[in-house]
Image: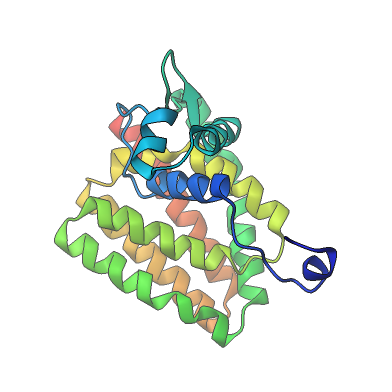
Amino acid sequence: METLASVRAGVKRPPNLRESVYQMLRERILFGEIGYEEKLVDQDIASRLNISRMPVREALMQLRSEGALQSTARGFVLRRYTRAQMNEAFEVRRLIEPQAAVMACMAADEGDLQGLPRPLDLLTQAHAAGDSAAFLRHKACFRSAWMDLVPNRTLVEAIERFYDHVHVARLLTVGDAAMRGLTVENMVGLYDAFASGDTERVRASALAQLDAMASRYNAIL
């Protein structure tokens, strides 16, 4: 049981069952492992995991409240956003995400950056191999690594909400080799800027990636 003393000491308790299911489903969404035609049914998921239905239901409901999923007659599916809603989400991210990257850069020391090269290398390899699923997975890991460095966790929560909203753009554009190459270029630029402590380059790289994604998404539509 988590005690007040452990909270004050910064000791993290292990996730409960609902939290574990939530994290598993959220990672599958971010990694592109759940398509827009797939239905998520609590009983089916619970059976596969050999657990009770309730924690799965609670995890699905949380994802719905966060905007990642929407309810259907039976189960849940990835939420459908209109083109206007998608572009509004991109606009909000342009306002806050580059600043979050700057804050991460200012807060990070050399040791904090050690988690960035590995997913970046794997991202580059996935692009070269044309492996869209691996590309999405390693991109999410790289992003998670630098987002963990942002000291303002309320800002991170706001960004994550809008990051989920534009998931369809990632699914639509990941098969485009040119877009993948531009993403790698921007991520390498972001890492180099982090490593040099150049906050203006950090801001520019984060903004360039958002603009490229929005532009390609609208071009495809």
Residue drawn at 36 percent across, 31 percent down: 44
Q: How many marks?
A: 0
Residue drawn at 33 percent across, 63 percent down: 184
Residue drawn at 42 percent across, 62 percent down: 141
- Furthest residue in direction top, as rendered: 73
Q: Nearer the viewer, residue 206 or 143?
A: 143
**In which quarter of the view is residue 105 placed?**
bottom right
- Furthest residue in direction bottom, as rendered: 110
Query: Does the rendering let one see residue 64?
Result: yes
Q: x%, y% of residue 164? A: 50, 41
Residue drawn at 35 percent across, 26 percent down: 39
Q: Nearer the viewer, residue 134 or 150?
A: 134
User: From the viewer's perspective, is 83 left or right of 129?
Assistant: right
Image height check: is 31 above or below 197? above
Image height check: is 181 above or below 121? above
Q: x%, y% of residue 38? A: 31, 29
User: From the viewer's perspective, is 60 left or right of 28?
Assistant: right
Q: Quadrant of the N terminus?
A: bottom right
Q: x%, y% of residue 127? A: 22, 60
**Colour theme:** rainbow
Q: Quadrant of the C terminus?
A: top left
Q: Nearer the viewer, residue 72 or 91?
A: 72
Q: x%, y% of residue 82? A: 46, 22
Query: Does the rendering let one see residue 216?
Result: no
